[in-house]
Image: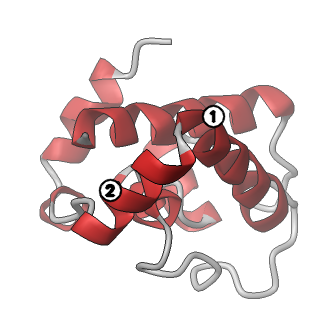
């Protein structure tokens, strides 16, 4: 999938642009490998982002602690409010598998661009 258009938009946001992988996250990514990190991303999106109702929406994604968390903030896939604003997926509706795959792919592309 081509993510150039969304990356161009995200690059114009001072908030989104400030996110970069820290050395600790890079080391973790190198140690685990992209396949494992992708499985983590799929799990985080499925459990924390995809449900129609998220009791702590807007606070469910930590700002640090895992490379995927950083990537979620950088790509505006951290909460349903950001996802609605940037990716136009409606809130309060469970994300489809296709939407989840799009977000995971975007996260992985951002991570690849960081290393």
Q: Residue at label 2? A: 26
Q: Is residue 90 visible?
A: no
For this orientation, the residue located farthest to the front is: 31
Q: Is residue 76 left or right of residue 104?
A: left
Q: Is residue 44 left or right of residue 88?
A: right
Q: Is residue 100 visible?
A: yes
Q: Is residue 40 left or right of residue 81?
A: right
First of labels 1, 2 by sequence position: 2
Number of numbered discs = 2
Residue drawn at 65 percent across, 80 percent down: 60
For mark 2, give the secondary structure. helix
For this orientation, the residue located farthest to the top is: 1
Percent coordinates x, y for residue 54 in the rendering: 81, 76
Query: Is residue 48 placed above or below 100 in the rendered structure?
Result: below
Between residue 88 and residue 61, name the one nearer to us. Answer: 61
**Distance from Cα at disc 1 to Cα at disc 2:** 14 Å
Residue drawn at 26 percent across, 34 percent down: 113
**Res 89 → quadrant:** top right
Is the image coloured rainbow, by chain, by secondary structure, or in one colour? Answer: secondary structure
Percent coordinates x, y for residue 39 in the rendering: 72, 44
Mark 1 is surrounded, within 10 Å at the Cα level, by few (under 14), some (14 to 19) or many (20 or more) other residues, namely: few
Q: Residue at label 1? A: 35
Percent coordinates x, y for residue 50 in the rendering: 80, 54
Query: Is residue 57 placed above or below 56 in the rendered structure?
Result: above
Residue drawn at 41 percent across, 31 percent down: 109
Between residue 46 and residue 34, name the one nearer to us. Answer: 34
Mark 2 is surrounded, within 10 Å at the Cα level, by few (under 14), some (14 to 19) or many (20 or more) other residues, namely: some
Residue drawn at 61 percent across, 38 percent down: 104
For mark 1, give the secondary structure. helix
**Res 79 → quadrant:** bottom right
Percent coordinates x, y for residue 65 in the rendering: 47, 78
Tags 1 and 2 touching, CB below 8 Å? no
């Amino acid at each position: 999938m081509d993510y150039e258009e969304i990356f161009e938009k995200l690059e114009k946001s001072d908030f989104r642009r400030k996110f970069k992988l820290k050395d600790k996250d890079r080391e973790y990514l190198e140690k685990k490998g992209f396949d494992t990190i992708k499985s983590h991303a799929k799990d985080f999106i499925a459990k924390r982002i995809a449900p129609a109702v998220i009791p702590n929406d807007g606070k469910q994604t930590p700002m640090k602690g895992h490379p995927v968390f950083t990537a979620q903030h950088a790509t505006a896939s951290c909460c349903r409010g950001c996802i609605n604003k940037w990716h136009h997926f409606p809130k309060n509706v469970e994300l489809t598998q296709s939407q989840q795959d799009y977000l995971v792919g975007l996260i992985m592309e951002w991570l690849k661009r960081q290393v």
